[in-house]
Amino acid sequence: MLLVLLLPCTSAIAGTLRCGSYLIQDGDDAFSVLSKCGAPTDRMTIAEPVYATSTDGATHATGLVGYTQLWHYDRGPMKFPVIITISDGVVQSIRFVR
């Protein structure tokens, strides 16, 4: 029973990053992350084609490209590095790397 009560807290903590006295979480904008955490140690941009589904259910490329950025923060000794995934200027996920 105790495990069931702890699961929601664990998932909330996994999607949250502390930068000094600030918290970063899914849904925050990229400018907020930069102002609170500073520049990332490294960045990678991934370009992916955008697909659309027509009324008959067929999927086709739209000719547009969507960009996803991966921001890596090396947070120093005794702290796990973190990768923040940003799409359309919004934090999509926060993952700690072991």
Image (spheres, rainbow, N blue to C red):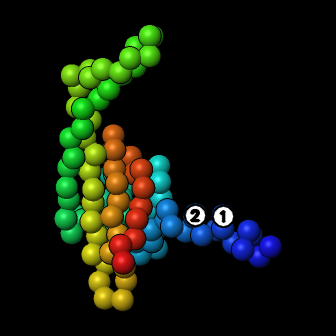
Residue at the spot of label 2? 12
The single residue placed furthest to the bottom in the displayed view is 78
User: In the rendered image, is residue 23 in sight?
Assistant: no
Image coordinates for residue 91, horizontal then vertical, percent? 40, 51
Tell me, yes or no, whether the two marked residues, 1 and 2, touch with CB atoms within 8 Å.
yes
Quarter-wise, where is residue 42 in the image? bottom left
Characterize the local packing of mark 2: few (<14), some (14-19) or many (20 or more) Cα atoms within 10 angstroms.
few
Callout 1 secondary element: helix
Q: Residue at x 31, y 88 (%)?
A: 77
Image coordinates for residue 98, horizontal then vertical, percent? 36, 78
Q: Residue at x 20, y 41 (%)?
A: 47
**Viewer-closest of 12 and 48:** 48
**Viewer-closest of 97 and 21:** 97
Q: Three-letter amino acid code at disc 1? A: Pro
Q: Residue at x 35, y 21 (%)?
A: 59
Quarter-wise, where is residue 68 in the image? top left
The single residue placed furthest to the right in the displayed view is 1
State how far apart marks 1 and 2 are (Cα).
6 Å
Characterize the local packing of mark 1: few (<14), some (14-19) or many (20 or more) Cα atoms within 10 angstroms.
few
User: In the rendered image, is residue 56 in sight?
Assistant: yes
Q: Is residue 61 above or below residue 30?
A: above
Q: Three-letter amino acid code at disc 2? A: Ala
Image coordinates for residue 23, horizontal then vertical, percent? 48, 66
Residue at the spot of label 1? 8
Callout 2 secondary element: helix
Q: Is residue 9 above or below residue 56?
A: below
Q: Residue at x 47, y 49 (%)?
A: 27
Quarter of the image with the N terminus in it: bottom right
